[in-house]
Amino acid sequence: MALLVSEWGAMHAWAIATAAVVSAGCALVGTLLVVRRMSLVGDAISHAVLPGIVLAVLAGGRPGGVLVLVGAVAAGLLTVWLTQLLSTQGGLAEDAGTGVVFTTLFALGVVIVTAAASRIDLDPTCVLYGVLELVPFDTVEIAGVNVPRAMLTATVVFLLLASAAWLTWKTQVLTAFDPDAARAVGVPVGFVTTGLMAATALATVASFEAVGAILVVAMLVVPASAAELLVHRLHHMAFVAIALAVAGAVIGYMAAWYFNTSAAGMMAVVLGLEYLVAAVVAPDDGILSRVVRRLGLAWRVLCEDRLAAMWRAEEAAAIQPATASADAPASTTSQVRPRGFSQQLALRWLAFSGRIAAVNGGWKLLVQGREEAGVIVRSHRLWEAWLGRHADLPLDHLHPPAEWVEHHLGASVRNRIEADVGRQGSDPHGRTIPPESEVKAEVEA
């Protein structure tokens, strides 16, 4: 009984290891495909290698053998050549030519597999979806250990791909991000691209037994796409993509065993879930980070609007009406009542951060708050002055656009606007534009 359990565990361990190595090789190649925006080409090659594999098997090769690898690479390069031929000579757009070539070659491969089913050991269903669960039963003996043939092929191919990437990495980076500069310094961009296509064909044929010709696309594209969201340097992206691919392979296989379903299909599903998680938590472009930035901007705008309202209230209170008593003191506090919980919360935060203070039932701007409020009011009135000079808008239409732009103008932009409007001292409504130097002087005083 213990022996059966041990053999059962070893069988699953070999299947998981094969899936992990296959996924790692695809992720490495997929990283370069994704950054070069050639994912569709990778999709095309992963399908178009099928007739090369089938013809190689008909010629006496066996899946995972050298002859099959040669046939797959030849079919992949034929795909690239035919795509370029249709684009340059046939007038087709590159994406349309790619679609025509890979669907035709893939269909041709399926037809050959079906027609020659009695003469070759290839099942159409396995061709499409792989037979990862059966990989441990086809073994070769190495140093007394029975190693799955697919595992051996995948390991050799991964080592070849990793070595090629390490030797040509700088060239790959330059070609991926600035092909014109690469050509200028003498890099054979076309040859590098052809090499990448050959590497894609190798990764695809190594994955053939494990996940088939369809689901290999997920391994080529999804881990690299998720890694691109998480990191921004290419070598970091390659390592993260490999890690995500291996994790997807392990978790996917175990989930497939638990739910008694297709291992390759579940691996692709797990990779898709990994991408969804990356899309949510990515530090710069993720959904969560964008929500946080938008909430942060909304909060900043709310606080700055409160400061600007207090500035204007204090400014209005400082201008005594002509009928006011000569000895009536000018109020220096804002009696503006906030409406809504968010505005009350903003006032409490401004008070806590030392920008305003509660005085006599109202609010008074402190040094830091006065500086920020003066900047906002200056930005607002300068933008209204610019609109009044250059835009044919009624006076009552100047305030709404200025109310939003006031939160996004830096000091250099404000000074340029001031120079453009002739350094006038007031906005179109006749309100004084506080000079930059005067705002700072008040704060320093």
Image: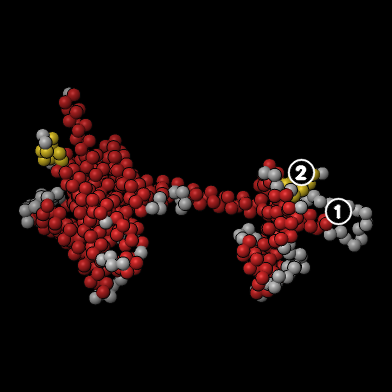
169 left or right, relative to 333: left
Of the two numbered discs 1 and 2 on the same chain, state the one appearing first in sequence. 1
152 left or right, relative to 339: left
Which residue type carries mark 1?
Ala
Quadrant location of residue 46?
bottom left
Circle 1 sits on which residue? 330
- Picture coordinates of residue 98 (x, y %)? 26, 65
Which residue type carries mark 2?
Ala
Q: Residues within 10 Å of mark 1 (few under 14, many from 20)?
A: few
Q: Residues within 10 Å of mark 2 (few under 14, many from 20)?
A: some
Of residues 314 and 335, the one drawn nearer to the viewer in this rendering: 314
CB contact under 8 Å: marks 1 and 2:
no
Q: Is residue 211 visible?
A: no
Q: Residue at x 77, y 68 (%)?
A: 430
Task: State whether residue 10 is above or below residue 204.
Answer: above
Q: Residue at x 19, y 33 (%)?
A: 10
Q: Secondary structure at mark 2?
A: strand
- Picture coordinates of residue 125 (x, y %)? 19, 50
Quadrant location of residue 43?
bottom left
Q: Which mark is residue 416?
A: none
- Picture coordinates of residue 1 (x, y %)? 17, 23
- Picture coordinates of residue 174 (x, y %)? 33, 61
Q: Secondary structure at mark 1?
A: loop
Circle 2 sits on which residue? 358
